[in-house]
Amino acid sequence: MLGDSAIAVHPDNARYKHLHGKFARHPFADRLLPIIPDTMVDMELGTGAVKITPAHDPNDYEVGVRHKLDFINILNDDGTFNSNAGEKFKGMKRFRARVEVVKQLKELGLFIEVKDNPMMIPICTYVDFHFFS
């Protein structure tokens, strides 16, 4: 969430049509997130609104390219977070930041719940056999 640069909603989702082109304020970083209509969003899944982190995920990357979103680097070379993640998280390692994000969201009254979310992790099966010879 610390590298988010937009919130996407399905263009046909009546719940969010009035928000197309509006902005939400990021809770930790000093930036506004445009609310963009995009058909990659499954309007029946969860809230029907999806945070977009173009520098993190292949699907988000495609949305980022389509909508000319910022690709925000939140990591230092040593794996800690930089100031783009927000001053509260600057210098933290990612697992510590995950705990702190939830804590901060709760303190701000913005936390609703945690749910398991099945993930598909792509694996490359290409092997260059010449490399091994």
Image (tube, rainbow, N blue to C red):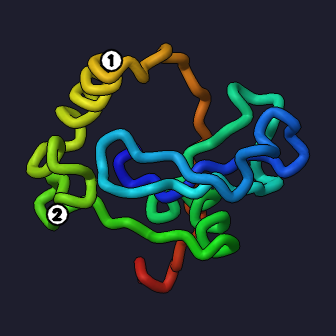
Secondary structure found at label 1: helix
Query: On the image, which quarter does residue 48 sit in?
Result: top right
Q: Residue at x 60, y 49 (%)?
A: 7
Query: On the image, which quarter does residue 89 sit in?
Result: top left
Q: Which residue is mark 1?
A: 106
Q: Which residue is mark 2?
A: 76
Residue 86: % across, % down:
23, 50
The quarter of the image holding the C terminus is: bottom left
Residue 43: % across, % down:
81, 36
Q: Amino acid at mark 2?
A: Asn
Say which of 115 and 71 sits in front: 71
132 displayed left or right of 21: left
36 displayed left or right of 88: right
Query: Is residue 123 visible to the viewer in this orientation of the structure?
Result: no
Query: On the image, which quarter does residue 67 sit in?
Result: bottom right
Sequence-wise, the earlier of marks 2 and 1 is 2
The quarter of the image holding the N terminus is: top left
Q: Is residue 35 above or below residue 43?
A: below
Q: Residue at x 79, y 40 (%)?
A: 42
Q: Residue at x 82, y 29 (%)?
A: 44
Query: Is residue 86 visible to the viewer in this orientation of the structure?
Result: yes
